[in-house]
């Protein structure tokens, strides 16, 4: 089956939404779950398929990965939806979707729903039963932004790959730990499990070139939040933050 291209425009985002910024003040332990819930970012690229038809979002790659609320256009092909409309517009806000027919001057929502995980959307067209849309990959875009720990940003990770992980697949992970600055960067590598390989998107371990485990049990809570354990097995929460200047691994 042909898939949409993995090449997407990249638009720099100046800042995160206020919900994310407010959440970043929590500590490494107690504030974690509440902070995760406040910054629900969903990778939107790819083809979302259902038994009724297919939905494809049109949004800048970086923008969707750095912000819990984004304005989107979408195209739909399949059985009657939104009065037969194929060109839709709306928002994704903290994991909630609301779309309307672009031709409707009153912007009345005709498809609303929730992303229940990074590859599943449960949405209900007006007057119809719920549809389940599934993406066969997650364009997680790990290289976008810098992953920084809560509670003072003591951990800073820059990934260089992967940008996309198919379901039922395992992809190589690469990047560097720049917690001590770029001059003291430590290269790391690992593997990312796609859905069906694991219950969620996970990176079991990140290891140094000397085979030391730097981080483990890395699990995506949203497209911009990961929980993990550091080398001392202490729990940390990592957030994807925009970079005024891109970090380059040596």
Image (cartoon, rainbow, N blue to C red):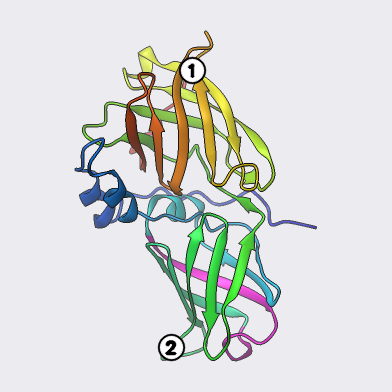
Which residue lies at the image location 68% right of the left edge and 52% below the top edge?
A: 5
Location of residue 212 with respect to 113 vertically, above or below: above
Counting labels gives 2
Neighbour tally class for label 2: few under 14, some 14-19, many 20 plus, Cα within 10 Å: some
Residue 126 is at least partly visible in this image: yes
As for residue 241 lying within the magenta part, the answer is no
Decide: few, some or many residues near mark 1? Use Cα within 10 Å; few <14, some 14-19, many ≥20: many
| Left or right relative to 157: residue 122 | right
Going from N to C along the chain, the mark reached first, 1 or 2, is 2
* Above/below status of 18 relative to 98: above
Element marked by disc 2:
loop
Q: Which residues are magenta?
A: 69-85
Where residue 145 appears, as percent x and y from the top left, is 41, 39
Q: Nearer the viewer, residue 152 or 221?
A: 221
Q: Do labels 1 and 2 touch, CB within 8 Å?
A: no
| Mark 1 secondary-structure assignment | strand
Give the residue pinned by disc 2. 108
Residue for badge 1: 187
Q: Which image quarter: residue 149?
A: top left
Relative depth, front residue between 247 and 111: 111
Q: Residue at x 37, y 12 (%)?
A: 184
Most extreme residue toward the right, as rendered?
A: 1
Q: Is residue 15 visible?
A: no
Q: Quadrant of the N terminus?
A: bottom right
Q: Relative to residue 125, is residue 17 drawn left or right?
A: left
């Amino acid at each position: 089956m042909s898939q949409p291209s993995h090449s997407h425009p990249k638009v720099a985002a100046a800042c995160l939404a206020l919900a994310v910024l407010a959440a970043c003040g929590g500590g490494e332990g107690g504030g974690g779950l509440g902070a995760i819930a406040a910054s629900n970012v969903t990778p939107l690229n790819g083809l979302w398929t259902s038994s009724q038809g297919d939905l494809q979002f049109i949004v800048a790659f970086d923008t969707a990965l750095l912000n819990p609320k984004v304005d989107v256009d979408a195209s739909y092909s399949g059985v009657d939806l939104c009065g037969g409309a194929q060109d839709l517009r709306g928002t994704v806000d903290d994991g909630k979707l609301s779309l309307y027919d672009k031709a409707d001057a009153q912007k009345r929502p005709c498809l609303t729903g929730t992303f229940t995980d990074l590859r599943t959307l449960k949405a209900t067209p007006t007057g119809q039963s719920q549809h389940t849309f599934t993406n066969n990959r997650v364009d997680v875009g790990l290289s976008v932004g810098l992953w920084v720990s809560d509670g003072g940003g003591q951990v800073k990770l820059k990934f260089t790959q992967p940008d996309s992980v198919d379901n039922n697949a395992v992809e190589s992970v690469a990047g560097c730990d720049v917690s001590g600055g770029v001059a003291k960067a430590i290269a790391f590598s690992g593997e990312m499990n796609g859905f069906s390989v694991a219950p969620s998107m996970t990176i079991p371990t990140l290891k140094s070139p000397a085979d030391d485990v730097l981080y483990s049990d890395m699990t995506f809570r949203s497209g911009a939040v990961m929980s993990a354990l550091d080398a001392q097995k202490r729990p940390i929460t990592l957030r994807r933050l925009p970079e005024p200047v891109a970090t380059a691994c040596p």
